[in-house]
Image: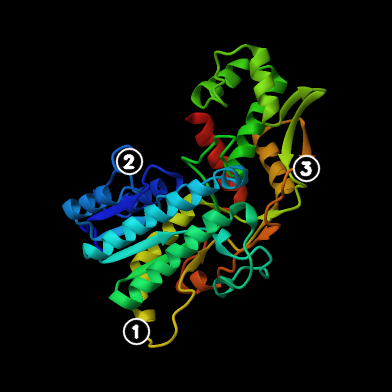
């Protein structure tokens, strides 16, 4: 892949895709073909076929996906399975039909069994049952890994798969119904701080930017407080922020720009064709991307609280599910290839909060 190569980033407006685009631009790449979801529905087989036939990209980063936190995963189960299968099937198959030189498929470490040993090694895939709340999403991503492996074996393609741990950073999803744990906590604690300070300008600006179930900054203070309470931002005896579950589950968190560097590194240095030519049974060719370090959700909440400057309390709602108790990745495979994460969790959250309050 050289600087003049024609590169298609599927999902370039999202958290993952936008970080990959920024990294490629920083590295001097300039020949991009980009389509937003309003321009190209990747679930539409005919539209995707027409796009590839017309544009003929040489390299593809498949970062487009329907994603969300535990609530969204468990609520929109059919959409998470159908949409993601259609997206990746269309893009991977059209990449083959149009002679794409190399493709990188992005998944998630939720592909691993619920009770797999820690840290999660690549060869733990399909060794036990999945976490039920995100089973449809995990199954779709496992199918994507196997599709890449199978095309490599049958057609001699060079399709690689990377499984990042939990990501956070610029362009994250802060919708409280669908967000992952870190952006959801960051927004709730940010609003909680504004509530305890009586800073309604900050609260109304936040809701105008991203309404909560139709409630924006034009609503009355009573309406806003009621809606915030529905999502665990409580203002009765001082401000309290509710956290789903016990707070004991542990999560590994990776600054998204570190992930982007890893993806570009793999696209440059990792060759799936080498694996496919060994004449052996080919399994688990995907590569974990992470920090190799984790933190409890309770500890994460305290870290965000300190960075934001929130003085209130946390309430743990143990009637809500914890999800997988631990998802720590074994990153020895990619570390041995020459890549390691650089940004600490504290540094990353500070950068993310600066980005959030500035955008």
Which label's residue is closer to the chain start, 2 or 1?
2
Name the element at disc 3: loop
As drawn, which residue projects farthest toward the right? 237
As drawn, which residue projects farthest toward the bottom? 279
* Distance from the alpha carbon under mark 2 to that under mark 1: 36 Å
Q: State the mark number for residue 277.
A: 1
Q: Position of residue 74 (x, y in %)?
A: 60, 47
Q: Is residue 44 left or right of residue 68?
A: left
Name the residue rendered at 57%, 40% in the picture: 179
Which label's residue is closer to the chain start, 3 or 1?
1
Q: Nearer the viewer, residue 220 or 213?
A: 213
Instruction: Please indicate, yes or no, whether residue 271 appears anywhere in the rendered image.
Output: no
Q: How has the structure been colored for display?
A: rainbow
Name the residue rendered at 38%, 42% in the picture: 13
Q: Is residue 79 left or right of residue 190?
A: left
Q: Position of residue 12 (x, y in %)?
A: 36, 46
Nearer to us of marks 3 and 2 is 3
Residue for badge 2: 36
- Please report contact status of discs 3 and 2: CB closer than 8 Å, yes or no: no
> Which quarter shows the N terminus?
bottom left
Quadrant position of residue 3: bottom left
- Please report contact status of discs 3 and 1: CB closer than 8 Å, yes or no: no
Above or below residue 221? Residue 328 is below
Nearer to us of marks 3 and 1 is 3
Residue for badge 3: 319
* Distance from the alpha carbon under mark 3 to that under mark 1: 51 Å
Q: Position of residue 212 (x, y in %)?
A: 57, 26
Name the residue rendered at 44%, 52% in the picture: 84
């Amino acid at each position: 892949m050289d600087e003049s190569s024609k590169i298609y980033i599927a999902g370039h407006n999202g958290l993952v895709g936008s970080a990959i685009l920024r990294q490629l631009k920083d590295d001097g790449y300039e020949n991009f073909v980009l389509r937003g979801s309003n321009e190209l529905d990747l679930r539409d087989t005919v539209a995707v076929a027409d796009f590839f036939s017309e544009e003929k990209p040489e390299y593809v980063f498949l970062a487009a996906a329907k994603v969300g936190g535990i609530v969204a995963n468990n609520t929109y189960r059919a959409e998470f399975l159908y949409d993601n299968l259609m997206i990746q099937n269309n893009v991977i198959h059209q990449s083959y039909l149009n002679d794409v030189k190399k493709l990188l498929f992005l998944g998630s470490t939720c592909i691993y069994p619920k009770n797999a040993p820690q840290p999660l090694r690549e060869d733990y895939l399909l060794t036990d049952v999945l976490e039920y709340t995100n089973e449809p999403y995990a199954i779709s991503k496992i199918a994507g890994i196997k599709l890449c492996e199978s095309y490599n074996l049958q057609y001699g393609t060079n399709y690689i798969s990377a499984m990042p741990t939990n990501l956070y950073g610029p362009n994250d999803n802060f919708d409280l119904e669908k967000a992952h744990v870190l952006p959801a906590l960051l927004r709730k604690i940010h609003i909680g701080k504004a509530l305890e300070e009586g800073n309604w300008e900050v609260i109304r600006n936040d809701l105008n930017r991203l309404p909560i179930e139709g409630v924006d900054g034009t609503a009355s203070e009573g309406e806003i407080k009621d809606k915030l309470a529905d999502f665990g931002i409580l203002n009765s005896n001082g401000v309290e922020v509710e956290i789903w579950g016990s707070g004991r589950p542990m999560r590994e968190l990776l600054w998204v720009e570190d992930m982007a560097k890893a993806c570009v590194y793999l696209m440059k240095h990792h060759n799936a064709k080498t694996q496919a030519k060994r004449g052996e049974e080919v399994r688990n060719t995907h590569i974990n991307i992470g920090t190799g370090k984790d933190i409890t959700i309770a500890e994460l909440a305290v870290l965000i609280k300190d960075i934001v400057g929130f003085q209130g309390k946390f309430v743990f709602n143990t009637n809500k599910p914890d999800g997988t108790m631990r998802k720590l990745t074994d990153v020895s495979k990619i570390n041995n290839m020459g890549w390691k994460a650089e940004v600490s969790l504290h540094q990353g959250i500070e950068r993310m909060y600066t980005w959030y309050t500035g955008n």
